[in-house]
Amino acid sequence: MSSSFAYLLRTTSPIGRLELTSDGTAVTSLSIERSGHLPLEDHPERSTPVLDDAAAQLEEYFSGSRRAFDVPVRLTGTPFRQAVWQRLASLEFGTFVSYGELGASLGHAGYGRAIGGAVGANPVPIIVGCHRVLSSSGRVTGYSGGDGIPTKLWLLEHEGILLAA
């Protein structure tokens, strides 16, 4: 996460505290508490309407009353990562895709490791649903947010996504 941000807001969730940053017009990052800590916990909060809206939408998502986010996000990365994140943003609540399918849909079949790296580098998880990417067998192979796989499993279960045994 970039250390330059104009606005910062923290909120609670069933998967731990969330920390959101913004440039004033869009959400630029979302971090999920890991082992009781957040990346910018030493910085004071300074909210803005877009962060207030994002926090309200996240609360609705966790309560089960919201299935899609419409808060603006600004995703900064390479053109390849941007393409992956744009595809992630198009995945609907309760649906999933494999890393291979994701790569093939972008014209990058066989780029599994690069696709996985881009998914893991998503700066705005949950809002941009990187938790909806599974292995080709339907198994959870990793998650960079919060406490890792348990956090991803919670999000998948919340959305009713059934996993392979």
Image: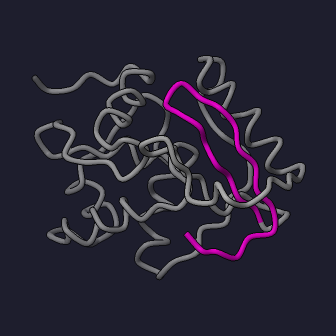
Range of residues picked out in magenta = 1-22
Residue 82 x/y as whole percent: 49, 71
Tell me: 161 left or right of 69: left
Judged from this view, the residue extending furthest toward the bottom is 78
Give yes or no for residue 7 being in the magenta stretch.
Answer: yes
Give yes or no for residue 105 being in the magenta stretch.
Answer: no
Residue drawn where x is 59% and y is 24% of the image: 62
* 162 lies above or below 39: above
| Residue in the foreground of this view, choosing between 77 and 91 | 77
* 157 lies above or below 102: above
Residue drawn where x is 45% and y is 57% of the image: 87
| Residue in the foreground of this view, choosing between 20 and 58 | 20
Residue 92 x/y as whole percent: 49, 37
Judged from this view, the residue extending furthest toward the right is 49
* 158 lies above or below 36: above
Q: Quadrant of the N terminus?
A: bottom right
Tell me: 19 left or right of 82: right
Residue drawn where x is 42% and y is 28% of the image: 94
Residue 93 x/y as whole percent: 49, 32
Residue drawn where x is 75% and y is 61% of the image: 22
Image quadrant assignment for residue 165? top left
Looking at the picture, the colour scheme in use is: one colour
Tell me: 118 left or right of 57: left
| Residue in the foreground of this view, choosing between 4 and 155 | 4
Judged from this view, the residue extending furthest toward the front is 42
For the image shown, how many numbered marks are present on the structure?
0
Image quadrant assignment for residue 113? bottom left
